[in-house]
Image (tube, coloured by chain):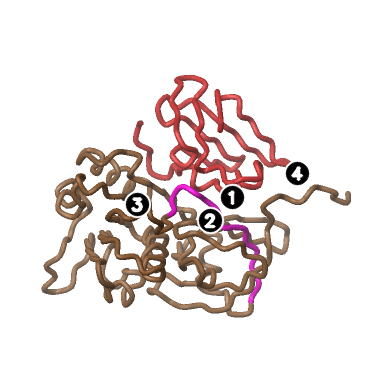
Chain colours: A brown, B red
Amino acid sequence: MAGTAVRGRLTWQTATVSAVMDETSAVRTLSFEVPDWAGHRAGQHLDIRLTADDGYRAERSYSIASAPGEPVAITVERLDDGEVSPYLTQDVQPGDEIELRGPIGGYFVWDGGASDSVPLLLLAGGSGVVPLRAMLRHRSRVGSSVPVRLLYSVRSLPDVIYRPELSAEPDGVQVIYTLTRQQPPGWTGYARRVDPAMIGEVAWPVAQAPLAYVCGPTNFVEGVAADLVALGYPPQRVKTERFGATGTP
Amino acid sequence: MRPLEDGVLDGNAIGGLLLEVFGTEMTVATGTCGSCGMTAQVAEMAVYQPKLGTVVRCRKCDNVLMVFVEVRGVTCVDLWGLAQLA
């Protein structure tokens, strides 16, 4: 039967892959040309929809990796048993078309405006670093001098996404890694899962009225958010975003 | 609020679905649980996505707040568990 359904108010649109870039052995950044893009905020995400020849569809959400004003980009981690991420990280080439909708979300965003002029505490578990990277790039682009600490929990140094960019540490940005599974010889940094003692050392003092953004797998976010609240951070100053095994956020 | 188990998502994950259903950004909307009265932003609610659809639950009492099921291209929405959504 012919469909006469009203178009969704947020519609799927066709984007063209403009560039692909490997970040690690399992992580790739895809940039898109989106003809009808409304412009996004740092921290937002978009949905991607793949349709198989037999009509089977799979949808996933991915955080936008680029700053507002930059070409839309997502960073995808390959899950070997995934339905979508192997295609996005191994098969997609520049020039390919992909269905997406967005930008999406208004909670886990940082605009860098006057009300955002307090110290930022960013806490990433694995690929949870992606929306936080968009915030860091946005901070640089708008010339914000807000002091930032990023605590990034990752299995090993080769698993660090955006490593060259993060190592550059722009003025006022401090990047602290904790390598949970494997450390290079002579590593003097953290080498364990994030715990209350680590949060206590890294977090800005509550008196500075900091704003915290936590993104990662659910158990990471739950632990870190609870630690921050125990430290005295008001819950509403701790923004959280969780992702599961089937995709991000 | 009770901690979420691994694999459980939050309301950020259904921002696209909500935008399509309501026509506006909803993750910062505030919902009031019809069972315990807890208020929370949608982004903070617990989201379960079994194959059949999407279930949103209260972080305090586990009450089902919203259910979304797509049937033949039409999204069916059940907001019965919410006292208010604004």
How far is the residue under mark 1 from the one under mark 3?
Answer: 21 Å
Q: Earlier in the sequence, mark 1 or mark 4?
A: 1
Query: Do the residues at discs 2 and 4 belong to one chain?
Result: no
Query: Do the residues at discs 1 and 3 belong to one chain?
Result: no
Of circles 2 and 4, the one toward us is: 2
Badge 4 amino acid? Arg
- Does the CB distance between marks 2 and 4 fall below 8 Å? no
Other-residue count near label 4 (Cα within 10 Å), few / some / many at <14 / 14–19 / ≥20:
few
Indicate which disc residue B72 carries. Answer: 4
How far is the residue under mark 4 from the one under mark 3?
Answer: 38 Å
Q: Which type of secondary structure does the marked residue at label 4 adopt?
A: loop
Image coords of residue A154 (percent x, y) = 29, 62
Q: Which quarter of the picture shows residue A51?
A: bottom right
Residue tagged by mark 2?
A61
How far is the residue under mark 1 from the one under mark 4?
Answer: 19 Å
What span is in magenta? A96-109
Q: Is residue A216 visible?
A: no
Indicate which disc residue A213 carries. Answer: 3
Residue tagged by mark 1?
B16
